[in-house]
C-alpha cells in the first residue's frame, strides 16, 4: 500500500509498504484513513529533521525512521481488538494521535500530553494517517457524529491546539483578543476565539495573501499589517480607554511577535504562547511586571477536549473546514503539499492529503 514517509530532511517519499498485520492486540484498532492534514511539525521535519521523528528507537513506542507521516486525520474503523468496546467496524473516527504511558506521574493525573515519554501517531509511532491502513490504540479512536465530514474530523487535531490557547487565555463572551500570526493555527485561533464569544478579534499578519485568506474565513476580524501600520495604535483605538486587549495569542513563534503581544494586552491581561519558538527570545521582563500580566505556555492539548470540539464543529460555531485551502493526492505530497506550504507567498493555510 502507498505511504507518505519521512526519511530525512528534504526527503519525503511515497513508498510501497506492507499493510498492518490483521492480528491486533486487545487494545488496538485497525483503521482506514480518509484524509490527513500537513502540519507545521511535518514541515519542520521536512526542512530540518529529524527533530521529533525518531532517528533512534522512541523511548515509549520503539518507532524509528522512516516514519509514516500524518497525525491530523480521520478514518473508518476496520477491525478492533478484543478489549475495545467504544468503537466498532464501520464507525467513523477522528484520531487523537498522542500515545503515552498511563501510569507515570502525568498519566496518573490525566495530563497525558505532558508525559516526557509521549509519542505521536504519524510522528513517532509505527503508523500514520498518510497511508491506506494504520493501527492505533483504543484511546486514539474518537468517534465523530454523522454531521461532521471526513475533513472536519481530520481538522479536530489542529483545532485542539488552537482551542487550548483560547482556554488557557480564558477567552469568554465579550473578550477582546489579539491573534499574532494568521497561519493555520492562527486562523483556527481566530475561529476558536469567535466560538468562545470574543467581541473583538484583531489579527496581526504581515503577509498579504494570508490577510486575504483570513478576510474570507473570518470577515469579522480586524486585520492589521504590522509592518505598515502601528499595531499598538490600532489596539488602543479599538479597546476601551485604549487599555489594550484582554488576551493576546502568539501564534508565530518569533521574538517580535511575543513582545508585540505583551505590549498589546491590558494590565492583568494574558499572553498565550501557542506558536513554538525554535530560538531563544529576549523579552522586557519589567514591562511584564509593571503590567502585572500573565504569560501562559501551551504544549499540544489535553486529549479530553476531542468530544467538545466535535460538538462545536457540528453546531456550526467552529467552521474549521474554512482553513483548508487545497486537497491533493499523496502522489503530489512534496510538490503540491510541502513545497506549496513553504512558499513565502503564503497562498495556502491547510493542505489535506488523500492516500
Image (tube, rainbow, N blue to C red):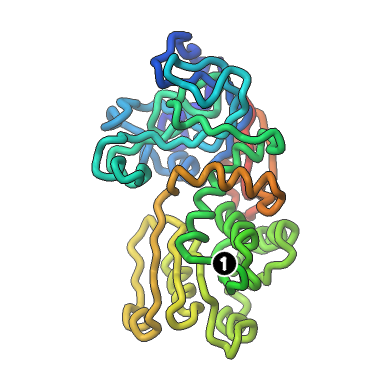
Quadrant the C terminus occupies:
top right
Quarter of the figure with residue 294: bottom left
* Residue 253 visible in the snapshot: no
Residue 96 lies left or right of residue 117; in this view the side is: right
Labels in figure, total: 1
Q: Quadrant of residue 201?
A: bottom right
For the N terminus, the quadrant is: top right
Q: Which x, y percent locates residue 41?
A: 46, 44
Where does the image place residue 78, in percent across and percent down from the top left?
57, 16
Task: Say whether residue 274 is left or right of residue 105.
Answer: right
Q: Residues within 10 Å of mark 1 (few under 14, many from 20)?
A: some
> In percent of the image, x 39 and y 60: which residue is there?
297
- Along the line of sight, the residue nearer the viewer: 212 or 308: 308
The residue at 48%/9% (across/down) is: 22
User: Which residue lies most toward the left here?
Assistant: 105
The residue that disc 1 covers is 172
- Classify mark 1: helix, strand or loop: loop
Q: Nearer the viewer, residue 355 or 322?
A: 322
Picture residue at 65% right of the left edge, 40% below the top: 152
Please name the residue shown 53% across and 33% down the image: 142
Say whether residue 353 is visible: yes
User: In the rendering, at what x and y percent does residue 37 appear?
Assistant: 58, 38
Amino acid at each position: 500500500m502507498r505511504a507518505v514517509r519521512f526519511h530525512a530532511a528534504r526527503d519525503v517519499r511515497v513508498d510501497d509498504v506492507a499493510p498492518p498485520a490483521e492480528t491486533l492486540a486487545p487494545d488496538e484498532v485497525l483503521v482506514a484513513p480518509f484524509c490527513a492534514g500537513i502540519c507545521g511539525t511535518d514541515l519542520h521535519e521536512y526542512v530540518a529533521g529529524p527533530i521529533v521523528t525518531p532517528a533512534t528507537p522512541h523511548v515509549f513506542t520503539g518507532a524509528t525512521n522512516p516514519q509514516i507521516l500524518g497525525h491530523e486525520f480521520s478514518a473508518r474503523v476496520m477491525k478492533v481488538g478484543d478489549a475495545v468496546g467504544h468503537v466498532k467496524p464501520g464507525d467513523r473516527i477522528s484520531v487523537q494521535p498522542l500515545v503515552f504511558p498511563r501510569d507515570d506521574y502525568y498519566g496518573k493525573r490525566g495530563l497525558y500530553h505532558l508525559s516526557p515519554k509521549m509519542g505521536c501517531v504519524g510522528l513517532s509511532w509505527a503508523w500514520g494517517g498518510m497511508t491506506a491502513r494504520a493501527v492505533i490504540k483504543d484511546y486514539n479512536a474518537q468517534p465523530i457524529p454523522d454531521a461532521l465530514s471526513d475533513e472536519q474530523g481530520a481538522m479536530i487535531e489542529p483545532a485542539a491546539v488552537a482551542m487550548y490557547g483560547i482556554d488557557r487565555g480564558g477567552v469568554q463572551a465579550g473578550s477582546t483578543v489579539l491573534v499574532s500570526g494568521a497561519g493555520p493555527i492562527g486562523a483556527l485561533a481566530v475561529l476558536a476565539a469567535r466560538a468562545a464569544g470574543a467581541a473583538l478579534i484583531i489579527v496581526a499578519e504581515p503577509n498579504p495573501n494570508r490577510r486575504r485568506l483570513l478576510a474570507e474565513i473570518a470577515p469579522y476580524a480586524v486585520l492589521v499589517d504590522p509592518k505598515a501600520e502601528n499595531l499598538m495604535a490600532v489596539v488602543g483605538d479599538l479597546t476601551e480607554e485604549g487599555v489594550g486587549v484582554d488576551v493576546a495569542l502568539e501564534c508565530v513563534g518569533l521574538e517580535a511577535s511575543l513582545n508585540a503581544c505583551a505590549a498589546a494586552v491590558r494590565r492583568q491581561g494574558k499572553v498565550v504562547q501557542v506558536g513554538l519558538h525554535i530560538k531563544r527570545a529576549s523579552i522586557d521582563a519589567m514591562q511584564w511586571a509593571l503590567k502585572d500580566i500573565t504569560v501562559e505556555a501551551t504544549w499540544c492539548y489535553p486529549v479530553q477536549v476531542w468530544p467538545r470540539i466535535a460538538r462545536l464543529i457540528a453546531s456550526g460555531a467552529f467552521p474549521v473546514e474554512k482553513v483548508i485551502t487545497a486537497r491533493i493526492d499523496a502522489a503530489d505530497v512534496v510538490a503540491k503539499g510541502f513545497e506549496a506550504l513553504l512558499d513565502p507567498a503564503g497562498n495556502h493555510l491547510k493542505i489535506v492529503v488523500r492516500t
